[in-house]
Image (tube, grey):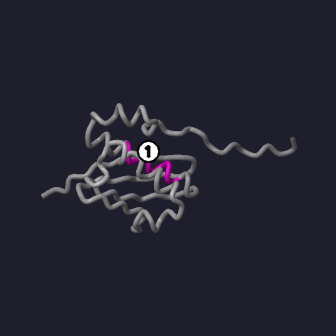
Amino acid sequence: MALQQNYGTGRRKSSSARVFLRPGSGAITINHRPLDQFFGRETARMIVRQPLELTQTTDKFDVLVTVEGGGTTGQAGAIRLGLARALVEYDENLKGDLRRAGFMTRDAREVERKKVGL
């Protein structure tokens, strides 16, 4: 029996996240660690949970994430985008709500280079 899962990729600043959604009880695992252990700040945890809370699917899926690069805020933003994309892959009807909330748009801002000698 094949395991049904949905996939989404998210990037922000220099962070990139691969997000897998599987039917389950609502456990969020990031780099083999629970969400509360991976992110110390409550704001980062809140950013990660936003797409699930908006679509009311908090207890419906287990979320497996691999994230690398950047700092905590960039990683949280990358996970949020990847999670939103995975939810749209699961159900196309969620796309409108996620787009209105701004979760489907990749934040294009990057760090500006240093200007030497100005």
Please name the predominant secondary structure of the magenta segment in the image: helix
Q: Nearer the viewer, residue 12 or 103?
A: 103
Residue 72 against residue 99 in the figure, above or below: below
Q: Residue at x 36, y 47 (%)?
A: 53
Residue that numbered label 1 is attached to: 81
Q: Residues within 10 Å of mark 1 (few under 14, many from 20)?
A: many
> Is 82 a magenta residue?
yes
Q: Nearer the viewer, residue 97 or 7?
A: 97
Left or right, 43 with reference to 3: right
Residue 97 against residue 28 in the figure, above or below: above
Magenta-colored span: 75-84
Quarter holding residue 1 = bottom left
The local secondary structure at tag 1 comes to: helix
> Is 79 a magenta residue?
yes
Q: Position of residue 18 (x, y in %)?
A: 40, 53
Q: Amino acid at mark 1?
A: Leu
